Amino acid sequence: MEYNIEDIVITKKSHPCGSKEWVITRVGIDFKLKCCGCGHVIMIPREKALKMIVKKKE
């Protein structure tokens, strides 16, 4: 699946704030994700991000 900036994705595990929805703010070798619940920003390797993402929200 192809991911673009500003896509909202749903992950397998929830963030400690309770939200499973993240906004993609950077795509490349690393993914930069922003939590839709609390606004926390994380940067993780592409390979790990693709494993944790379940689906893209339409």
Image (cartoon, helix red, strand yellow):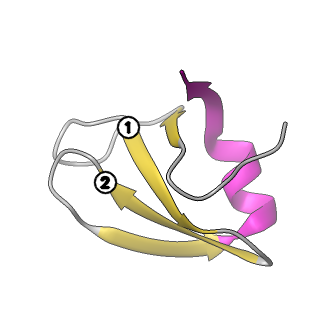
Q: Residue 21 carries which label?
A: 1
Q: Earlier in the sequence, mark 2 or mark 1?
A: 1
In the rendering, at what x and y percent does residue 54 appear?
Answer: 64, 28
Left or right of 20: which side holds 45?
right
Q: Which residue is drawn at 72% across and 59% down?
A: 48
| Nearer to me, 30 or 52 | 30
Left or right of 53: which side holds 43?
left
Left or right of 54: which side holds 43?
left
Q: Are marks 2 and 1 in contact (CB under 8 Å)?
A: yes
Q: Which residue is drawn at 63% across and 39% down?
A: 53
Badge 2: few (under 14), some or many (20 or more) residues near its Cα, within 10 Å?
Answer: many
Badge 1: few (under 14), some or many (20 or more) residues near its Cα, within 10 Å?
Answer: many
User: How many discs appear?
Assistant: 2
**Residue extent of the magenta highlight:** 45-58
Q: Which residue is drawn at 67% across and 53% down?
A: 4
In the rendering, at what x and y percent does residue 15 appear?
Answer: 31, 47
Left or right of 16: which side holds 10?
right
